[in-house]
Amino acid sequence: MQALGARLARALQAPPAGGCIIYLHGELGAGKTTLVRAILQGLGVSGRIKSPTYTLVEPYALPGGAMAYHFDLYRLADPEELEFLGVRDYFAADALALVEWPERGEGVLPAADVHIHIRYAEGGEGREVLLTPVAGGRHAWLATV
């Protein structure tokens, strides 16, 4: 997950990335948060990168002035709770949004540009990761991964 996160970060830094909404799918413990941390570190975030399991979202300033937002919606009881967070404010055109458990925010979250599906490899050793761009989404950066 660390190596993949570093590769994704390099690709996201290259033009014409701009903002992007990435949904991360997978079981508990599959490596979603580890991947997000590696991406954020690769983008230049220093210091502690906390899991937003209880806060639902953690903001991070990126070098150059853009923002990244890490969402963990596992504990979300109702998608409408996102409205109380002012969720729409987090999805600016130049922001990077990394959303774990996006299905829990269905109907309120904007559409993803890219879906990342993580699952345990057969035999339990390692992970299998599938990156799926969404038609019309901001995902040209994927070509450089």
Image: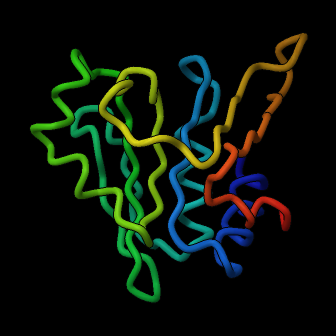
Q: Percent x, y for residue 18?
A: 55, 74
**Number of marks in picture:** 0
Residue 53 sits above or below residue 63 on the image: above
> In which quadrant of the rendered image does the N terminus lie?
top right
Q: Give left or right: position of 114 versus 3.
A: left
Q: Percent x, y for residue 64?
A: 45, 89
Q: Give left or right: position of 41 versus 105.
A: right
In the image, farthest residue toward the left: 84
The residue lying at 48 percent from left, 48 percent from top is 98
Q: Give left or right: position of 111 versus 57.
A: right
Q: How is the image coloured?
A: rainbow
The residue lying at 35 percent from left, 65 percent from top is 92
Q: Give left or right: position of 127 versus 50.
A: right
> In which quadrant of the rendered image does the C terminus lie?
bottom right
In the image, farthest residue toward the right: 123
The residue lying at 80 percent from left, 28 percent from top is 127
Give the camera-side residue of 76 and 46. 76
Residue 52 sits above or below residue 74 on the image: below
Q: Percent x, y for residue 36?
A: 55, 49
Q: Percent x, y for residue 74?
A: 37, 23
Give the camera-side residue of 100 and 88. 88
User: Which quadrant holds residue 29?
Assistant: top right
The residue lying at 77 percent from left, 62 percent from top is 7
In the image, farthest residue toward the front: 136
Residue 43 sits above or below residue 119 on the image: below
In the image, farthest residue toward the bottom: 64
User: Which quadrant holds residue 89?
Assistant: bottom left
